[in-house]
């Protein structure tokens, strides 16, 4: 049995947008308003998924799919609908309503308050929704089909028409299934950008130093980048210091490289963490798309295999190594 | 027969999460609900509804019988203004099941139940005076042998007895707009409470005033870990300050107990209950982290049951109608009583 994680937002339409006002963690949240489309991610078809997000809202006048799972060509395997006018949260499985609760009863009508909304779904077994760690909706058995994506705040008709902010969205998938139906954890994601030269600089920068090509607060695509025309080539950079919130600990470091390959060749990439002595690389070389997209890996321990600490994170360098056929 | 407090809204802690909002509510309607210290019925703060405000109230967990009481003070209601003084919602219904409407153009005060007009009077006859604190009460029992009564200053002004389509209700809200302009100027709301009244007869909801006391000094227990300084200094905020100052525990059974400030009980009033608040949150959705609150007289503790905690700062509270030794409250004992909370970690 294996569990992997994903954290990428896709299918961004006019809304949602990135907003620097009042995020749960870091500097930005995902803002929905005025007729939002859904945002989420897809993943390998899996029997079981769990995940969650922090959510703050001030209500909506229109019904919204808060969560939809994909994986069935005909219906959403799981669909959580919030109908504000009816004060109702409804859980549909394979397009059939299986459970509902008044939003007031669920504690979903305290406006401008952060909630953690989670889900734990296994095909043929269960579909459960958790609010602040408390199960508020459940259905058994779960959907008939395995799932391959999860999207937040997809419009029923006109979408979320007031504002809501999502932050720290994640999804875990389990290809085989069989994990207990329990409340998903509520992790938070602190962002640390490249901010200085590191030990390794083997890629070719467009101009200037390697680290300066990948220190963009906002990705600037072809304007600044490093290029590798052979493998293996290694870049590692210093990154900004993080401050772990009080009472929290570092569970994992997730290096992200916004990457693309220049030809259909089998170019791949490994993410890297380096502490000045030890180097840890992605266990498997990761595919690189033809247009800029995040390529990432999740390191549960530091370069020499110890649990992460704030100081260990801040003293580590992070980078990437070219692999495959360039 | 039981009367049990399920919520109160006072503004004294200056924290929005003490109330839930009428649904649906727009951005503008939500923004039109603010704290105010311009007009108060008791303490230092009230909630103020401006023109086009959304309703302010309390959600409940499928209650079959309840009562509310609140004080309100309005500045003006112009011709054309139209306000739902009270709206009672049931999950699964788009329109409130019980609506008390004040239509200024006709001065009509009407009671609508399940979409049908059941009773009416005029605001003038009921005594709706501007710039005056008025006490509004509502009693409701759902189902086949139901009733709805509306009281102004404890005098029944509207009533219905008979069948109600709903057997349970999920929220009661004051002052929302009926699809247009509501309060043409401000309306202030203070000392709002909601009680479950299972098995009780229809009687006028009593007047209540809520006097706020703030933690001022160390008491009998200091087992949580303060972010800095002393435990009591982390929870003596006049305005709830979120993560800035707080105490923390990851261990079951830790207690903090404090001494608090002593505002006088108003003349001709008596203490009905002590309501202990802890503004708390848990840090992870996993696990069962809960909290108890307690009173302590130096010898005995009286603790609440373990209560759920949200993921953002919210009030966890219990209403203690008696002292730990079972005696009635009086001002001297209430002043000497210590208050606190206890961690419950499963």
Image (cartoon, rainbow, N blue to C red):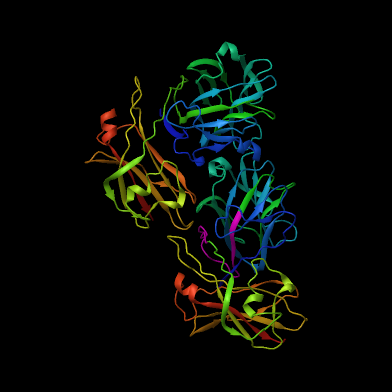
- B257 vs B47, left or right, is left
Residue A54 drawn above or below residue B258: below
Q: Is residue A11 visible?
A: yes
Which residue, as the protein is rendered here, is positioned at the far front? Answer: A208
Residue B176 locus on image (x, y percent): 61, 30
B306 vs B337, nearest the viewer: B337
Residue A253 drawn above or below residue A199: above
Residue A56 locus on image (x, y percent): 58, 49
Quadrant, the C terminus of chain B: bottom left
- B92 vs B269, left or right, is right
Residue B31 drawn above or below residue A237: above
Quadrant, the N terminus of chain B: top left
B214 vs B271, nearest the viewer: B214
A221 vs A147, nearest the viewer: A221
Q: Which residues are magenta?
A: A166-187
- B9 vs A44, left or right, is left
Residue A80 drawn above or below residue B57: below
Q: Is residue A243 magenta?
A: no
Which residue, as the protein is rendered here, is positioned at the far top? Answer: B125
| Quarter of image, res B317 | top left
- B276 vs B134, left or right, is left
| Quarter of image, res B120 | top right
Which residue, as the protein is rendered here, is positioned at the far right? Answer: A263
Please tell me how many numbered marks the rendered image carries.
0
Which residue, as the protein is rendered here, is positioned at the far left? Answer: B299
> Residue at horizontal 40%, vertical 44%?
B237
Q: Is residue A167 magenta?
A: yes
> Residue at horizontal 33%, vertical 50%?
B231
Residue A217 locus on image (x, y percent): 64, 66
């Amino acid at each position: 049995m294996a569990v992997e994680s994903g954290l990428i937002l896709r299918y961004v339409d006019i809304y949602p947008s990135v907003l620097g006002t009042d995020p749960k963690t870091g500097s930005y949240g995902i803002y929905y308003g005025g007729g939002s489309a859904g945002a989420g991610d897809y993943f390998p078809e899996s029997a079981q998924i769990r995940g969650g997000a922090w959510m703050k809202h001030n209500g909506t006048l229109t019904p919204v799919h808060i969560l939809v799972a994909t994986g069935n060509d005909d219906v959403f395997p799981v669909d959580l609908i919030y109908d504000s006018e009816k004060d109702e949260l409804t859980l549909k499985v394979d397009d059939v309503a299986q459970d509902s609760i008044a939003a007031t009863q669920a504690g979903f009508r305290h406006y401008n308050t952060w909630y953690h909304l989670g889900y734990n779904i296994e095909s043929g077994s269960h579909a459960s929704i958790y609010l602040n760690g408390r199960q508020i909706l459940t259905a058994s058995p779960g959907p008939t089909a395995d799932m391959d994506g999860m999207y937040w705040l997809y419009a029923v008709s006109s979408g979320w028409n007031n504002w809501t902010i999502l932050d720290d969205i994640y999804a875990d998938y389990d290809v085989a299934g069989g994990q207990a139906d329990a409340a998903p954890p509520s992790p938070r994601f602190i962002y640390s950008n490249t901010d200085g030269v590191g030990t390794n600089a083997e890629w070719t920068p467009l101009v200037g130093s390697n680290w300066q090509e990948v220190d963009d607060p906002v990705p600037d695509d072809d304007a600044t980048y490093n290029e590798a025309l052979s493998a293996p080539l290694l870049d590692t950079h210093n990154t900004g210091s993080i401050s772990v919130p009080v009472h929290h600990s570092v569970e994992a470091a997730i290096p992200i490289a916004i990457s693309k390959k220049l030809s259909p060749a089998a170019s791949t990439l490994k993410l890297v963490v380096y502490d000045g002595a030890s180097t840890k690389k992605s266990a498997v070389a990761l595919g690189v798309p033809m247009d800029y997209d995040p390529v990432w890996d999740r390191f549960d321990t530091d370069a020499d295999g110890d649990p992460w600490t704030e100081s260990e994170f801040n003293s580590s360098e992070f980078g990437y190594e070219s692999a495959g056929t360039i | 027969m039981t009367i049990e407090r399920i919520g109160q809204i006072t503004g004294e802690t200056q924290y929005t999460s003490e109330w839930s909002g009428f649904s649906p509510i727009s951005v503008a309607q939500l923004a039109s609900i603010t704290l105010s210290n311009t007009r108060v019925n008791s303490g230092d703060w009230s909630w103020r509804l401006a023109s086009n405000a959304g309703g302010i109230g309390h959600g409940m967990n499928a209650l079959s019988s309840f009562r509310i009481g609140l004080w309100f003070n309005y500045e003006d209601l112009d011709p054309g203004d139209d306000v739902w003084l009270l709206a009672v919602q049931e999950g699964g219904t788009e329109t409130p099941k019980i609506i008390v409407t004040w239509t200024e153009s006709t001065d009509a005060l009407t009671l609508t139940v399940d979409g049908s007009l059941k009773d009416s009077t005029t605001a003038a006859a009921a005594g709706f005076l501007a710039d005056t604190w008025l006490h509004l009460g509502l009693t409701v029992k759902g189902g086949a042998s139901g009733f709805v009564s509306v009281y102004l200053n404890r005098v029944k002004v509207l009533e219905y007895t008979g069948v109600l389509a709903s057997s349970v209700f999920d929220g009661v809200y004051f002052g929302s707009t009926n699809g247009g302009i509501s309060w043409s100027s401000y309306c202030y709301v203070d000392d709002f409470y909601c009680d479950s009244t299972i098995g009780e007869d229809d009687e006028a909801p009593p007047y209540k005033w809520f006097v706020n006391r703030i933690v001022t000094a160390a008491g009998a227990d200091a087992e949580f870990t303060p972010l800095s300084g002393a435990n009591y200094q982390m929870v003596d905020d006049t305005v709830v300050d979120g993560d800035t100052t707080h105490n923390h525990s990851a261990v079951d059974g830790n207690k903090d107990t404090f001494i608090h400030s002593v505002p006088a009980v108003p003349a001709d009033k008596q203490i009905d209950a002590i309501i202990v608040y802890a503004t708390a949150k848990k840090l992870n959705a996993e696990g069962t982290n809960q909290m108890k609150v307690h009173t302590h007289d130096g010898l005995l503790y009286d603790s609440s049951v373990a209560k759920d905690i949200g993921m953002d700062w919210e009030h966890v509270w219990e209403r203690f109608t008696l002292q730990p030794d079972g005696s009635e409250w009086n001002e001297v004992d209430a002043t000497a009583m210590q208050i606190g909370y206890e961690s419950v970690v499963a």
